[in-house]
Amino acid sequence: MKTGRTNEPNPDLWPKAVARLPTLAFRRAPLLTAVCWFALGEVIARNHAPMVMLFLAMSLLCALTLASLRWSLRIAIVPLAAVWMALGLFCAEVQPAPPTQHALKTYADGLSRQVRGRVVRVRELVPQQGNSDQDKETGWWAEKEENEEAAAIGALSVDLQVDAVEEVTPDVAWMAPVTGGARMNVLPDKPAVQNAAPTGSLAPAVRPLPTLKCGDLVQAPMRMKVAEYYRDPAAWQYSDYLLAQGIGAHASVRVSKVSILSQASSELAAAKSDYAAQWQCKIFTAQNWASGRVLGYVHSKANRGLPEILRLNQDDAGMLNAMLFGDRAGLNKTQRVGFERTGSFHLFVVSGMHVGLLAGLVFWLARRLKLSDLLATLLTIVLTFGYALLTGFAAPVQRALFMTTVFLLARLLSRDRNVLNALGAAAMAVLVLSPNALFEASFQMTFLAIVAIGGIAIPLGERSFLPYARAADHLWDKWVDVGLPPRIAQFRLMLRMGSEAIASLLGQWSRRLLPLAVRSFLWALELSLIGVVAEMVMVLPMAVYFHRATMFAVPTNLLSVPLVAILAPTAVVTFCASLVSPWFALLPGAMTALLLHGVKGVIGRVSALHAADLRVPAPAWWVAILAVAAWAFCCWAVRRSRNWAWAAVFTLPLVALIVLWPEHSVISPGMMEVTAIDVGQGDSIFIVAPDGATMLIDAGGPVGGVTEAAEATSRFDVGEEVVSPYLWSRRFRRLDVLALSHAHSDHMGGMPAILRNFRPRELWVSIDPNSDAYRSLLDEAKDLGVTVRHFYAGTQLAWGGTQITMLAPEPGYANPGEPINNDSLVMRMQYGDSSVMLEGDAEAPSEREMLAHKRVAPVTLLKVGHHGSRTSTTQEFLDAAAPKDAVVSVGKGNTFGHPRYEVIERISEARTKLYRTDEFGLTTFLLGRDGKIRELVDASNP
């Protein structure tokens, strides 16, 4: 018999003592282990690595042989791992490929064709005064002329299940059967010209937007377009976004051109093939109805009569609709950026997190009402499913609902209620049905958040202060002390003594003050611990998918989460009350507005700090693997012992630091690099000097002159979505120089994002035209501490081991009006015997000025002026430049016909190799000191 004193509580003496945290082992979380092997099989299948599979199979067989010699009872783990990997590989291989919509895309050729199809989704696009998220949903940024009008008067976005498209030949036209999805923006008719109607008569009324329902068969003439594909590393692709929604082409149509051939019929409802589409359409209709009720209250007389601080406005409605119903159409882009900078964006848009939080709240309330586990689980699943339908039932919400359901069922059936095992079951269910979910940010972040909270944060709390938080409850029930360890029982005794001392001074009413304060402090400490651990784990996906390091996420969330916890139910009450009457919703609406404005104020002040917006490149692949391994170690260590738990405490911040640690940029030392970035019909040239200095000339943007309307309607930010990801893919964090050739939007539109993301040391410009957007750019540069320098022809300077000479515009040139192409800053860069001329959009008059002042000499590489327009690259200019290579930045299938045939012919006759971004995508030229040039084209681009 063992004798001696021990620090461990005697289980007979302390029958209710807090149990030791069980060590993380295979037998305690077999499904979590299984899903890891399953996911590895899907990764292998995605990368098509048969040799890797063979190597792993051989390795597993060798391990099985060696294990069987020593641990005959444990060898099953190795073949089980192989089985799960094979199952993951099988599920990934048998998953049907998403439709490519090739048949429909062949008709997106710029011709006006009749298109017939069934309505599967209808959304009303409300007029916008500022930037909103609805543009990524509809693709308005691709159609500038119609956008400016639609932004002012509103439109409809209609998704069609196409069944026929007009086939046009010189002799006859007919409706050819075609399947696919098309998104149609229905715009109001243009108002009639005033003198078109006879004197004294009324002008014809503008036809209202049609009332379309799910299943309606409609037909309209469309000039279908395929979303532009940017062939740059890491660029966000709108075309992929549309394909994921079953949309292969998009177009804009005037309302008078839309014909409703038949209403939704019963035979359509009976068609099994249309069940899913019609069901989805009805879900979207319910979502639009809910959003419309919120907008109805905002515009009601009751709300408008309140003071501003208590009044909900249009932007507030956009936030509430995004938070409650997942409708982001009215979400203001400026506010969105503020929430993204502070790591609080997830609080205000419906995502998988909202589904999980709702399920947790409902389950907690059900258990507080003393419902059984079975009834509480069923009630939670039913209510969460109803909420998911109201939010539009998007793919992330579907996965979150499915994972939540499986998690709750696994918890109900599991004997020890292991969180990680239930998480493994939920993840396995999702990956079996949708293997591609493994590679999506929403799944990864949901999985990691649960691991961070349930696998690391809560066990750390159990090792430290959470037992004390529970002990502070029911303090005056002394029988509870009998079932607790001595240190916890002593803590309760001291709390009672302190409470009695306070009561002797203030009275009996104050007995509960000390326990309440202690409980509040400890639960706030738990919230802080969860926030800190979650942010340290989220640092990897945030850097990979969003290129952000949210430095103020924890303090901001600690301030905003309690407010949002009150705001969300108050907003729900406001919505429900508005269904009865706006006057009935007046009081909860005022409280909702007060809370919402408080949250916006906190977020706005924090996001205004420059340090809050730290943009970072994604880490290298080995850093990601190291981080995952470290988190797995932390999950094991916090359950092993107190000493190992301390190791986990130090590991978490160390891994976060490694993820954010700057890495060396990818450059070619000793070479001058000139890269033409594919920004569509725009310009963006990236230059790396021989000594590593960096310069970005232009940053693409929407086509056309910069006006306030263009700024308001072109919300697809090519600087944020295309140019910045390319620079991050090469590990660049800052630029030395940002240069603007001239103030047209297809050159300047993406520059504000580049300014914010890369904080260049200098901004190079030339003349100052009359442009509000240009002045805003200069103001932002000044606010960020960027030095602005003006250059004119004749200026020379040394930069990065090269010699730069400015060729245009002339020092006496001025343009007090709107920006024009001949404002372009033209520069020549010389490195040894190699040189490059960067012409911007300079046209023939500017070229003649350069020739007249004898500034044009032979160069190695020419960036062709004005996208290959016939107004540039004159024969005399080309003869004087005599480039070996030429590159033109141009959009695929652009309506301007760039580059013009005569310019291509001229370059060809000069025996100059021509590279086009619409054909080659991103193209890099490496120029050596000896005058040689090497071209690099990304072969992986389609």
Image: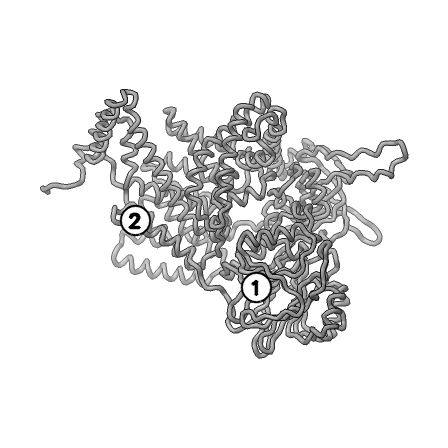
Residue 51 screen position, x and y as percent: 45, 63
Amino acid type of the residue that numbered disc 1 sits on in the rendered structure: Met
- Residue 745, quarter of the rendered image: bottom right
Residue located farthest toward the right when viewing the structure as drawn: 199
Q: Quadrant of residue 422?
A: top left
Callout 2, which amino acid?
Answer: Ala
Position of residue 493 in the picture relative to residue 436 (left or right): left
Q: Report if the CB atoms under discs 2 and 1 are less than 8 Å apart.
A: no
Q: Is residue 43 left or right of residue 915?
A: left
- Snapshot quadrant of residue 803: bottom right
Q: Residue at x 37, y 38 (%)?
A: 527
Instruction: From the viewer's side, name the closer residue of 568 and 515.
Output: 515
Q: Which residue is mark 1?
A: 695
Nearer the camera: disc 2 or disc 1: 1
Using residue 138 as the reference point, say whether residue 650 is left or right of it: left
Residue 116 rendering spot, x and y as whole percentages? 73, 42
